[in-house]
Image (spheres, helix red, strand yellow):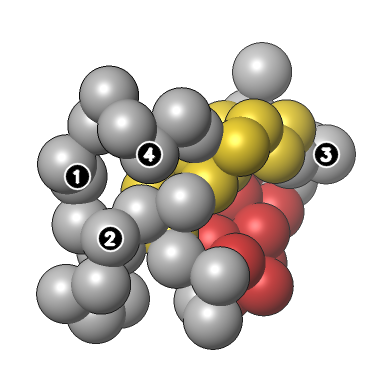
Amino acid sequence: MVYCCEEHVELGLDVIVDEYETFPVLTKIDVDNLSTSCEFCQNRAVYLVANK
């Protein structure tokens, strides 16, 4: 799983494809209930990219 902001969502998709060689699943996070930061910068994460 990769948490990412709007700016880095394409990087998150690429990471999942490269690591798992499968289609990524993109889920928008309810930002009011989560304070997780992007894995590529320190902005608030907006998306969760997973492999299943």
CA neighbours of label 2 inside 10 A, class few (<14), some (14 to 19), many (20+): some
User: Relative to 22, does residue 2 appear above or below in the rendering?
Assistant: below
Earlier sequence position, callout 2 versus callout 4: 4
Taking the view exactly as shown, the residue that stands out farthest to the top is 52
User: In this rendering, is residue 11 above or below 37?
Assistant: below
Q: Which residue is mark 2?
A: 44
Q: Quadrant of residue 27?
A: top right
Residue 31 is labelled as: 4
Q: Are marks 2 and 4 in contact (CB under 8 Å)?
A: yes
Q: Nearer the viewer, residue 31 or 17?
A: 31
At label 4, the amino acid type is Val
Q: CA distance from mark 1 to mark 2?
A: 6 Å
The numbered mark, 4 or 1, whose residue comes first in the sequence reads: 4
Neighbours of disc 3 within 10 Å: few (<14), some (14-19), many (20+)? some
Please give the residue where the numbered disc 1 appears in the rendered image. Answer: 36
Q: Residue at x 61, y 37 (%)?
A: 28
In the image, 34 versus 17, the foreground residue is 34
In the image, which disc is placed on residue 23? 3
Verify CB contact (< 8 Å) between mark 4 and mark 3. no
Q: How many marks?
A: 4
The reply to whether residue 48 is visible in this rendering is: yes
Element at label 1: loop
Q: Residue at x 45, y 66 (%)?
A: 5
Instruction: Give, as a three-letter code, the residue at label 1.
Output: Thr
Q: Position of residue 33 (x, y in %)?
A: 27, 24
Is residue 25 shown left or right of residue 20? right
Eye-nearest disc, 4 or 1 = 4
